């Protein structure tokens, strides 16, 4: 996916987020993020959008103050949209050679990095808002997520976020995890050990220690622990040995 595709998907995610948050109500609990209600979810996403914008513009930001602003906003959804609009404008206006923070293994140039990261950050949190609306973990068919977005998000997670030195994915005994979408040709093989995981594209192996197979959107949600649609021993092993948690 290119920058404009990421931005289009980000806007779609904001629309879905806003719709679910409005329908559920701000006090509704969020099944996929225990101990949070929708108000806190909206505030968190608004902080992340504004923080990302600050990175792009070279500005300072007090996350705690911004979170209080979001929690106290008279119209939390409008506040969310305002931050998202400013983020999209900042990414679109950024020069291709922009120098700014990026924090994934093998990160692309900052403009492309932030478009991709915020696309998936917002898409996953829109799923959280949907879980509040539904009162349960969503399934792929409940979402508006397209296969192309899901595949790109799986790739970002497995080749970028997962490979960071501080990721939680470790195993005392080396193991391999194959991620095999049923509706696309993309494949990933993740080698997990006591060191940072190493992901290889195109080498998904059905003989891997753990095999995760299903539609791309279902895999995307499952790998982010946002759905219980894929239920088998392989996924249980993934959840126990390779759970990814991001603060």
Image (cartoon, rainbow, N blue to C red):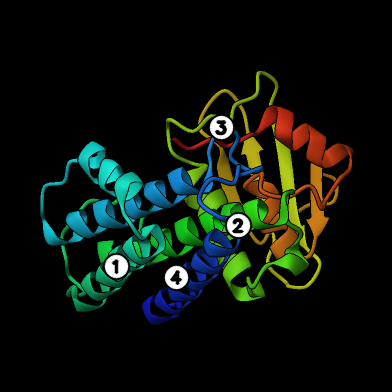
The kind of secondary structure element at disc 2 is: helix
Whichever of labels 3 and 2 marks the residue nearer the N terminus, that label is: 2
Please report the residue visible at 44 percent of the width from the left and 79 percent of the height from the top. Answer: 8
Which residue corresponds to mark 4?
10
Labels 1 and 2: the sequence-earlier one: 2
Q: Are marks 1 and 3 in contact (CB under 8 Å)?
A: no
In this rendering, the answer to whether 239 lies above or below 102 is above
Q: How many marks?
A: 4
* Front position among marks 4 and 3: 3
User: In the displayed structure, does residue 92 sit left or right of residue 195?
Assistant: left
Q: On residue 230, which mark appears?
A: none
Which residue lies at the image location 59% right of the left edge and 26% below the top edge? 170
Q: Earlier in the sequence, mark 4 or mark 3?
A: 4
Asked which secondary structure carries label 3, the reply is loop
Instruction: Classify mark 3: residues with Cα within 10 Å, few (<14), some (14-19) or many (20+).
Output: few
Tell me what residue is drawn at x 62 percent, y 66 percent. 151
Residue mark closest to the camera, 4 vs 1: 1
Q: Nearer the observer, disc 3 or disc 2?
A: 2
Q: Which residue is mark 2?
A: 24
Q: Nearer the viewer, residue 197 or 223?
A: 223
Q: CA distance from mark 4 to mark 1?
A: 13 Å
Q: Position of residue 132 (x, y in %)?
A: 63, 51
- Which mark lies nearer to you, 1 or 2? 2
Question: Based on the displayed image, in which of its 4 quarters is residue 142 positioned?
Answer: bottom right
Q: Secondary structure at mark 4?
A: helix
Comes first in the chain, label 4 or label 2: 4
Residue occupied by mark 3: 35
**Residue hosting label 1:** 82
Crowding near the residue tagged with mark 4, few <14, some 14–19, many ≥20 C-alpha atoms within 10 Å: many
Mark nearer the N terminus (1 vs 3): 3
């Amino acid at each position: 996916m290119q920058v404009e595709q990421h931005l289009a998907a980000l806007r779609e995610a904001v629309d879905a987020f806003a719709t679910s948050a409005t329908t559920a109500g701000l006090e509704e609990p969020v099944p996929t993020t225990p101990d949070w209600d929708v108000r806190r979810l909206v505030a968190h996403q608004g902080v992340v959008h504004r923080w990302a914008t600050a990175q792009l513009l070279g500005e300072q930001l007090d996350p705690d103050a911004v979170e209080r602003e979001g929690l106290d906003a008279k119209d939390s959804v409008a506040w969310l949209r305002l931050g998202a609009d400013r983020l999209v404008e900042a990414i679109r206006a950024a020069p291709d050679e922009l120098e700014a923070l990026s924090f994934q293994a093998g990160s692309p140039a900052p403009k492309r990095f932030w478009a991709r990261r915020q696309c998936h950050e917002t898409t996953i949190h829109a799923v959280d808002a949907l879980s509040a609306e539904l009162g349960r973990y969503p399934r792929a068919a409940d979402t508006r997520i397209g296969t192309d977005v899901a595949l790109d998000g799986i790739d970002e997670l497995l080749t970028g976020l997962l490979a960071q030195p501080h990721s939680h994915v470790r195993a005392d005994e080396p193991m391999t995890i194959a991620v095999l979408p049923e509706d696309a040709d993309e494949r990933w093989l993740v080698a997990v050990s006591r060191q940072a995981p190493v992901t290889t594209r195109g080498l998904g192996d059905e003989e891997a220690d753990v095999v995760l197979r299903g539609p791309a959107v279902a895999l995307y949600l499952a790998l982010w622990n946002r759905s219980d649609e894929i239920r088998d021993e392989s996924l249980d092993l993934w959840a126990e040995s390779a759970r990814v948690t991001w603060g």
